[in-house]
Amino acid sequence: MSRVSLQTLIDRSVRNMGAVDSRIRDMAVEIIKRAYKEGINVQISSGLRTHAEQNALYAKGRTAPGNIVTNARAGQSVHNYGLAVDYFLTNHTGTTATWTVNAQWRRVAAIAKSMGFTWGGDWTSFPDAPHLEYTKGLTWRDLQAGKRPSFRNVPAVEKTWLELGDEGAGVKAMQELLNKHGYAVTADGIFGRMTESALRSFQYQNDLTVDGVYGTNTKAVLEEKSTSKPATKPQPKEEEDEMLKQAIVINTFNDYPAAEVLAVRLKAPIYPRAAVKGEVAKELLVVGGNKDGLKADKIIVLAGKGRFDTAEKVQEYVNKL
Ligand SMILES: [Zn+2]
């Protein structure tokens, strides 16, 4: 029998991972490739876990049948933030899963650790051999508060994505495509805060992972949209259905950090003011500046004298939610 193909292992894994952070997806694929070269067949069994899924898992062995499998409730697992994956090995043909923590299993952990992952098999209190997470020392409490690990200097992984701080022709091409779709950004080849927020808006409106990272999925959708024929004019009814419940508007990127706190909490996109044409959401939360010229059923202005006052206003608002 011939060996399972690398592509099969990758395809199954990408499907199982779900909407994890696109950099985690790329790194997991890299792990699979490297292990495959060494004759190890590894597959990812899960990645992103919703809060409901996490609570169902927590109930196992407690209020539901089965053995206890986790100590983490919703929000307390790195899986809930799309920064963890679980793996297992398969047999030669890829038809059977093996869960024995042998030398091959530990080799996969070592490859992942060389990229910056933490391996659950190293934990003493609750060893979790299938588990890999990328947190760079952040705890779930940090993640819950909106902090995210740095992906700078991931060793020896071909960087297949573009993100905040990147510069060059690839960034410029992305900005030009975003512009074409009505997301007003300066096509200067510099991936700054405004570009990131425009990209997040695009991701949000196209059911992509809203991570502000230009990875393989987002790139494919943006490029596909740009080559396909313009859609026929939508009916008014559809337009109404497509309108967002909430969106956040910023005037300057100085208010971006404050707006991001709100965006994470409300799961709403951030628009640079210049990108807001007509009515984009039923409710607008304006972070910094005023509501002049904006249209929505409800407009909430969260603004102070400077960006620190504004951030304070946002924090007060979030605390009351
Ligand atoms: Zn796990």
Image (cartoon, rainbow, N blue to C red):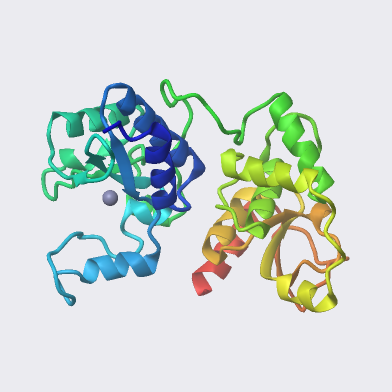
Closest to the observer, 250 or 195 = 195
The quarter of the picture where residue 164 lies is: top right
Closest to the observer, 27 or 190 = 27
Spot occupied by residue 229 in the image (x, y as percentages of width and height): 83, 51
Residue at 50% over, 69% down: 319
Vertical position of residue 159 compared to residue 310: above or below: above
Closest to the observer, 3 or 164 = 3
* The furthest residue to the front: 1
Closest to the observer, 154 or 259 = 154
Residue at 26% over, 45% down: 95
**152 left or right of 60?**
right
In the picture, which quadrant includes the N terminus? top left
Spot occupied by residue 175 in the image (x, y as percentages of width and height): 76, 38
Vertical position of residue 26 compared to residue 154: above or below: below
Asked if one can make out residue 313 in the rendered structure from this viewpoint, the answer is yes
Asked if one can make out residue 253 in the rendered structure from this viewpoint, the answer is no
Vertical position of residue 213 compared to residue 64: above or below: above
Spot occupied by residue 153 in the image (x, y as percentages of width and height): 46, 24
Residue at 21% over, 28% down: 107
